[in-house]
Image (cartoon, helix red, strand yellow):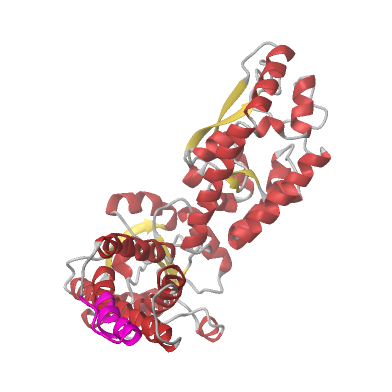
Amino acid sequence: MAALGWTLFFVYRKFIIEPNKFGYKIPLELDDNFFLALVLVPFYWFILYYLAGHYKDVWRKSRINEISKTFSVTVIGVVLQFFILLIDDEIRTYQDYYKSTLTLFVLHFSLTVTVRLIQAYWVKVLLKRKKIGFNTIVVGNNQKSLSLVKELLDPQLTQGFLLKGYVSYNGDSDDHILKDLIPNLGTYSDLPARIKEYAIEEVILGIESSNHLEINKVTNVLEDQPVTLKIIPDLFDMMSGQVRINNVIGTALIEINHDVMPQWQIVAKRLMDIFVSAFVLIVFCPLFLVIAALVKGSSKGPILYKQIRLGLKGKPFHILKFRTMFTDAENAGPQLSSHNDKRITPVGRILRKYRLDELPQFFNVLIGEMSLVGPRPERKFFVDQIVRIAPHYKHLHRVKPGITSWGQVKYGYAENVDQMVERLKFDILYIENRSIAVDLRILIYTVLTIVRGQGR
């Protein structure tokens, strides 16, 4: 549609705009620039729509959202095209600029949104015919869950939820009021196994949204699961503006969405990770060699220290560091370092003070295992201990771990599990408020910490 819209706009310029300027008909010649534009213009629009998040969850498209999002991206895209391609056009008056820009907008928007609405309509048809759908589990065994299930099973209100069963969250296995409608699949603690067994994509909580304790129990179990989590709103949720209607005849649900960063910021964050880590690895290569020589001469053992940490979605990876401890530092088992830790070498103490031991982690960032900013990754040994005290620690695995973090800037390195739990609140605060601006602030504070030698 972008290519077709540009072609029609090209014809419009040749038949309307340019004759107004020169006073005679301009022949329609499809030159090399035209064919180059047919390649570059669609690619340009693809990038814009990708950054705007148009290609996420393609089976869950809302026609209302498609119109509004396509309109906003088209406005931005056409304005950029004007300054990139059209501002040098041969025109008679400045009104021709307005006509050209408006015509390009109308052509691109009308063609694109028409096809997208057709696609969205066809998806709705497939959902209603159950040709496609989302395997769903309901959490709850109460009157609220019963009303929800009856509504989701109504063929006139089909939204694509394929109900595989329900689980109880209160542990009560007697008198299940939903058992005549959908199968009983156990309790909420069985959710990870049932999600894998039935390839579940959606989990709907039939729990009062004000019941934070029960919701936290379920969300902690689902934290590392690849599902979309939704909850039935109450009147307060509706009045507070948390409920958004995308489907007039559909069930009103609140999606518990932790993707607070828009798509363009996610892409920008990854690009920043790549460029900064590549810059550091190349420009500071002489410093790497100097540190390597110092580490090698300080004590016996390897220059680099590899340790298995838990990263995104709890996936283990090898974190890289310059070795700052003697090789027998953990013969007695995993231990956290302390302020006056005798296991740290003299050179290692200096490296830790200025956080130079973390430099090899820029390679972890470059290959995508870590980010510049994110919660510090921990070993499974300590994660298991933390989760017993603070089950919500699993929330940290929603994002990539980082070389530096808000928790590290505000609190510093932890010397025991209790301090890890104390630092946790800063990392969760970061996750729920993360943005490029926040990352830049954390990086600035980290640089100041390094310059002042306040690391340890």
* Residue 72 spot, x, y in % from top left: 43, 77
Left or right relative to 432: residue 335: right
Q: Where is the C terminus found, in terms of image quarters? A: top right
In magenta stretch: residue 17? yes
Q: Is residue 233 above or below residue 406?
A: below
Assign the N terminus to one quadrant of the image.
Answer: bottom left
Q: Position of residue 86 (x, y in %)?
A: 40, 73
The range drawn in magenta is 9-27
| Towards the viewer: 407 or 212 | 407
Look at the picture and state if 426 lies above or below 152: above
Quadrant for residue 124, please give it: bottom left
Looking at the picture, tell me which residue is in the foreground, 185 or 218: 218
Q: Does the segment drawn in magenta span residue 82? A: no
> Residue visible at 25% across and 66% down?
133
In this rendered view, identify the residue nearer to me: 411 or 117.
117
Examine the image and state in which quarter residue 6 appears.
bottom left
The quadrant holding residue 253 is bottom left
Q: Is residue 86 visible?
A: yes
Name the residue rendered at 66%, 20% in the picture.
292
Task: Give residue 280's position: percent from left, percent from top.
Answer: 61, 37
